[in-house]
Amino acid sequence: PPDRDGDGILDANDACPDEAGIAALNGCPDKDKDGIADKDDKCVDVPGLAKYQGCPIPDTDKDGINDENDKCPTVAGVARYEGWPIPDGDGDGVNDE
C-alpha cells in the first residue's frame, strides 16, 4: 500500500500524503506541536489555540493582558485596572489615587 511521505499512515487515510505527519492529525505535520495541523494553523511557528486558528491569545497593546480580558486592548494598561492605563486625570504624572 502506498505511503508517499513515509510517516506510517497509508495515503488512503492520510490527509497530508506528501508531508510526514502524525496519526493524531490524520497524517498531517504540526511544526509548533500545538495540536493543530500546519495546514489549518495560521501561526505554524508559534504554539497557539484552535480558537485563534493556531495563533497565541492576542495582546494587541502588548501590556501582558490578553485582549479578551483587556477593557482597553489598544492602549497599554495594568491588570489592576483591567487593562486601562493608570489613571492620571490631571496629567501631572501622579496616579489619581
Image: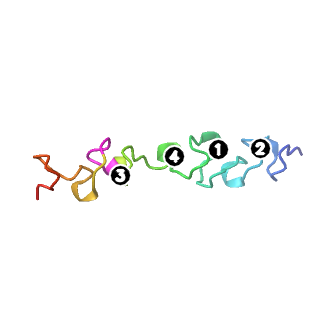
Circle 2 residues within 10 Å: few <14, some 14–19, many ≥20: some
Residue at the disc numbered 2: 19
Check the picture and name the quadrant holding the C terminus.
Answer: bottom left
Q: Disc 2 to disc 1, how far (Cα)?
A: 10 Å
Label 1 sits on what residue type?
A: Asp
- Of badges 3 and 2, nearer the viewer stands 3
Q: Disc 4 to disc 3, how far (Cα)?
A: 18 Å
Residue 75: name its quadrant. Answer: top left
Q: Disc 3 to disc 1, how far (Cα)?
A: 29 Å
Question: Horizontal and vertical percent for residue 21?
Answer: 73, 50
Residue at the disc numbered 4: 55
- Sequence-first disc among 3 and 1: 1
Q: Dot 4 lies on which element? A: loop
Label 2 sits on what residue type?
A: Glu
**Pointer 2 with pointer 1, Cβ within 8 A:** yes
- Of badges 4 and 2, nearer the viewer stands 4
Q: Give, as a single range, the part of the protein colored magenta.
A: 68-75
Residue at the disc numbered 1: 38
Q: Disc 4 to disc 1, how far (Cα)?
A: 11 Å
* Residue toward you, 15 or 57: 57
Q: Dot 1 lies on which element? A: helix
